[in-house]
Image: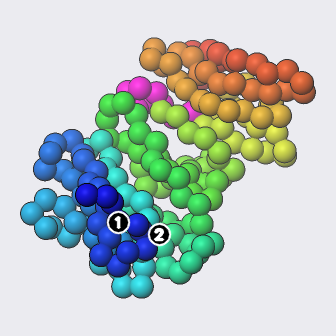
Amino acid sequence: DKEKPPDDPNYMSPPRFGRTDEDFAFLSLKVALVGDRGKILAGPYPGRMIGRFGFLRDGTVWHAHTFGGEGSRSTLVVGGRKICEGVEIQDPILPRAGSRYAFIVDRTAYVDGTVPRWGSGVVNLAFSPNGDRLAHTFRSGGKYQVALDGVRVDKQYDQIVGLKVDDSGRKLHFVARQGGQVLTVAAELSAVR
């Protein structure tokens, strides 16, 4: 069977799975998230539409729902708790292990449900594999810079793309553009605590 187009009033999305086969959800009529045995996980939201959803590592359901058309503000909900509203909500950033999570909403970082003191102007996030540390790229004064746990790590660049804390947690890798040069950077993190 071919999937029905999203504007179909009887639309049901393909399911997304969490930690077990019983942790799953799908969109029903674009207004409610439905899980195992028909349990309503979120919604229904009359007059609103759930656009995106998924699971965090611990099985917690997250979703973003919107009222109105393009350019309207979406509401981010994690585990049944409203976190924030914004126009641009990115999918969550998750470490390979642990239950931490982070979202970027309108260039503001929400880490484990709250905005850290360094949370504005954020364009990219990356957890260390174990989730203990969080790196971010931010824009200030037209330049980009990286930081780890809110502490600046390296100099400013014209552009920074990609961001990864290596498996050892001792280096932060990214690609930067400075003038006409493209640089691959591996910043040592041992001094950043």
- In the rendered structure, does residue 130 fall within the stretch colored magenta? yes
The three-letter code of the residue at mark 2 reads Thr
Q: What is the secondary structure assignment of the residue under circle 2? A: strand
Residue plotted at (62% across, 31% down) = 162
Residue at which label 2 appears: 75
Percent of width and height locating residue 13: 31, 61
The image position of residue 93, as x and y in percent, is 46, 42
Mark 2 vs mark 1: in front: 1
Give whichever of 128, 174 is nearer the camera: 174
* Residue located beneath label 1 in the image: 4
Asked where in the image residue 86 lies, by quadrant, the reply is bottom right
**Depth check, front residue: 1 or 108:** 1
Give the side of residue 38 with respect to residue 170, left or right.
left
Rendered view: 108 above or below 154: below
From this view, report whether residue 64 is shown above or below residue 180: below
Does the rendering let one see residue 169? yes
Q: Is residue 12 left or right of residue 167?
A: left
Q: Residue at x 65, y 17 (%)?
A: 187
Q: Which residues are magenta?
A: 128-135
Q: Residue furthest front?
A: 1
